[in-house]
């Protein structure tokens, strides 16, 4: 059985030149035929260097670096916006578009309907203008109006090629004790996929997104049991959130864990690693993140739930240097996406032809 690996690109259009940056020019050609599997490009610096990409998305984030959704309630504005994106994608050899929207949307509002229409019309125009292209849409870790982002998930899923479920930032609205917790606790993460599937969204439209970053929380108070209470930073109607912490890339985490006071610890309840360290001012921090041990069971459920594939945010934050320790850590993170080793031999050998890890 072949599965799909979709590595989401975070390419900003400004970074892309209209001259093919790859050593092998065929990698710039837009993909026209159905592929057995997909490996989509990472971020620009790595991409330009290696061009191990076969599939490149134009990444747009509505309301953040792009127009607010309210402008796109208007049909003419919407059409102009889509036409513009198609032109950009064509001129930059891209194979599709990934739409990200992180602003609040109220159910039944004009924006709610405009968003659904936007996805539908974007998909129609991309498919028509760039044959074989893909339109993907980013959704929060659960369909239950997380961060007040209420969308018509079912119609949106029907209207595009795939949903990229962002299974991270799961502490953006902490309703219980205001303490540091895992970015993507296992049970909560997997239950949320059942919520999507219970809406009767096809598993073949769902790509799991896992975090390659963690959260560094300064502890206001650090209990004897190792519980780190964090500053109350409200977010969208909830008094406490992960905004009290700072997002840190995996390569930083792997260096920091070595100089931590605790070393790597494991939380059985949340099935996630964490560690504690003291900063220069003597303040204790607790850091929660994902590593191969926490990612592997998530990747396994991509297979058991028969989802379309897996991706990460984001591929560029591993250490791609020649350092042997970093190299091994980076390889293990990529391999973790394939789940437990036994299940993936065929897929892995296929993948190795397409990804350059250094
Ligand atoms: C259309 O978009 C422009 C910005 O491009 C904005 O100024 C205008 O208000 C929008 N029109 C409507 C009706 O939303
Ligand atoms: C810090 O935690 C201790 C127990 O570990 C508690 O007695 C104390 O009241 C806490 N302090 C604050 C400021 O929350
Ligand atoms: C962390 O410590 C281990 C064991 O001491 C060592 O092998 C490894 O090279 C260190 N990793 C980094 C990134 O410094």
Image (tube, rainbow, N blue to C red):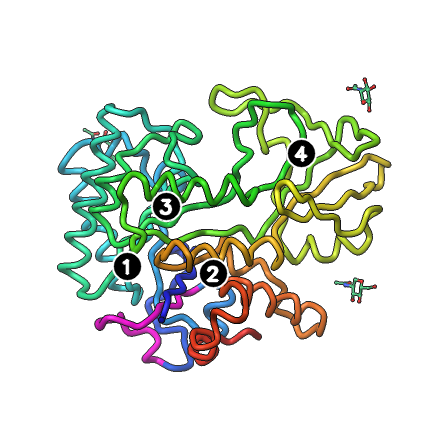
Residue of label 2: 43
How many labels were placed on the picture? 4
Q: In screen coordinates, is 356 left or right of 178?
A: left
- Choose the circle earlier in sequence order: 1 or 4: 1
**Residue 321 vs residue 147, the one in the foreground:** 147
Q: Is there a contact, CB below 8 Å, between mark 1 and mark 4?
A: no
267 over 130 or under it: above or below: above
Mark before the other along the chain sequence, 3 or 4: 3
Residue appearing at x 25%, y 36% in the figure = 115
Q: Are marks 3 and 4 in contact (CB under 8 Å)?
A: no
Find disc 1 in the rendering and name its residue.
96
Where disc 3 sits, the SS reads: strand
Foreground label between 3 and 4: 4
- Residue 358's place in the image compared with 165, above or below, is below
- Expressed as whole percent of the image width and height from the top left, the position of residue 162 reads 30, 52
| Gap in angstroms between the C-alphas marked 1 and 3 | 14 Å
- Residue 68 within the magenta-colored segment of the rendering: no
Magenta segment, which residues?
A: 25-41
Residue 38 in magenta stretch? yes
Q: Ligand 3 closer than 8 Å to the CB at disc 2? A: no
Element on which disc 1 rests: strand
Q: Which residue is mark 4?
A: 180
Marks 1 and 2 in Cβ contact (< 8 Å): no
Image point (51%, 63%), residue name: 339
- Marks 1/3 in contact by CB < 8 Å: the verdict is no
Crowding around mark 1 (Cα neighbors within 10 Å: few <14, some 14 to 19, many 20+) is many
Point out residue 84 in the picture as x, y percentages from the top left corner: 22, 51
Residue corresponding to mark 3: 138
Q: CA distance from mark 1 to mark 4?
A: 37 Å
Distance of mark 2 from mark 3, alpha carbons? 17 Å
| SS for dot 2 | loop
The structure residue drawn at horizontal position 67% and vertical position 29%, both measured from the top left corner, is 179
């Amino acid at each position: 059985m072949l599965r799909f690996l979709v590595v989401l690109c975070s390419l900003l259009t400004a970074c892309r030149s209209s001259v093919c940056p790859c050593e092998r020019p065929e990698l710039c050609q837009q993909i026209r035929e159905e592929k057995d599997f997909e490996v989509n490009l990472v971020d620009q610096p790595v991409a330009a260097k290696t061009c191990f990409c076969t599939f490149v998305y134009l990444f747009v984030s509505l309301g953040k670096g792009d127009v607010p959704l309210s402008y796109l309630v208007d049909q003419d504005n919407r059409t102009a916006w889509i036409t513009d994106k198609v032109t950009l994608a064509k001129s930059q050899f891209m194979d599709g578009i990934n739409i990200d929207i992180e602003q609040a949307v109220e159910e039944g509002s004009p924006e709610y309907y405009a968003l659904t229409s936007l996805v539908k019309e974007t998909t129609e125009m991309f498919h028509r203008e760039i044959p074989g292209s893909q339109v993907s849409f980013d959704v929060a870790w659960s369909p239950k109006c997380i961060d007040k982002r209420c969308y018509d998930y079912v119609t949106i899923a029907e209207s595009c090629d795939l949903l990229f479920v962002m299974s991270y930032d799961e502490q953006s609205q902490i309703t219980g004790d205001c303490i540091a917790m895992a970015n993507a606790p296992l049970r909560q993460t997997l239950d949320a996929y059942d919520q999507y599937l219970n809406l009767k969204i096809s598993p073949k439209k769902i790509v799991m997104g896992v975090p390659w970053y963690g959260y560094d929380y300064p502890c206001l108070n650090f209990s004897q049991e190792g519980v780190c209470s964090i500053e109350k930073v409200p977010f969208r109607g909830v008094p406490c959130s992960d905004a009290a912490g700072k997002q840190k890339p995996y390569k930083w985490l792997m260096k920091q864990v070595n100089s931590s006071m605790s070393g790597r610890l494991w939380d059985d309840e949340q099935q996630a690693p964490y560690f504690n360290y003291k900063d220069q001012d003597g303040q204790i921090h607790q850091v929660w993140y994902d590593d191969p041990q926490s990612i592997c069971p998530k990747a396994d459920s991509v297979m058991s739930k028969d989802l379309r594939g897996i991706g990460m945010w984001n591929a560029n934050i591993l250490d791609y240097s020649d350092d042997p320790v970093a190299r091994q850590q980076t390889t293990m993170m990529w391999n973790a996406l394939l789940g437990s080793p036994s299940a993936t031999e065929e897929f892995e050998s296929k993948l190795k032809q397409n990804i350059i890890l250094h």
